[in-house]
Amino acid sequence: MNEKDRYEQGLSVRREVLGTKHVDKSLTNRTSLTTDFQELITRYAWGEIWTRPGLPRKTRSQITIAMMVALNRNEELALHLHAAKNCGVSEEEVKEVLLQTAIYCGVPAANSAFHLAQTIFAETTIQQNPGA
């Protein structure tokens, strides 16, 4: 696969996982400083890694959530908590991933992640049921 094809495949997967709105915003906000980085992550993170057949997308999503907790990267964690649903990860499965992180990443990291997940899932529920 050439670089252009890898980019296009990555862009497609990136949109499926993160949502078109988020990806379009990222691409629209590119600058001379960030354009090369956006192309790099689209080609390699999304076009090379997320498209590999060795793990299902759902598993990749769960692993990514755990790694964001471990690295204390709450902005990226929030992004991937939102994206988890697009990958077929249930809230119950997110809970299990976060419980696992409590043991291997530490209770404070998991506590922060649980608070973030609770906020995101509540917002999602409100958006899905605005009159409820």
Image (spheres, rainbow, N blue to C red):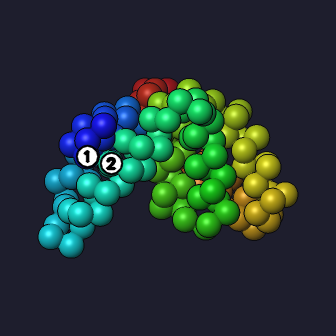
- For this rendering, which residue is in front, 87 or 121? 87
Picture residue at 71% right of the left edge, 33% below the top: 92
Q: Position of residue 72 (x, y in %)?
A: 61, 67
Instruction: Tell me where residue 76 appears, x and y as whole percent.
Output: 48, 57
Is residue 52 left or right of 38 when viewed as pictured? Answer: right
The residue positioned farthest toward the bottom in the image shown = 33
What residue type is disc 1 on?
Glu
Residue shown at 55% from the left, 65% from the top: 73
- In the rendered image, residue 52, in percent from the top left (x then y), is placed at 49, 35
Rendered image: mark on residue 43? 2
Q: Are marks 2 and 1 in contact (CB under 8 Å)?
A: yes
Say few, some or many: other residues with alpha carbon within 10 Å of mark 2 (under 14 / 14 to 19 / 20 or more).
many
- Name the amino acid type tagged 2: Arg
Q: Who is closer to the viewer here, 17 or 128?
A: 17
| Residue 3 numbered mark, or none | 1
Residue, x 63% and y 56% (percent of image)? 67
Number of numbered tags placed on the structure image: 2
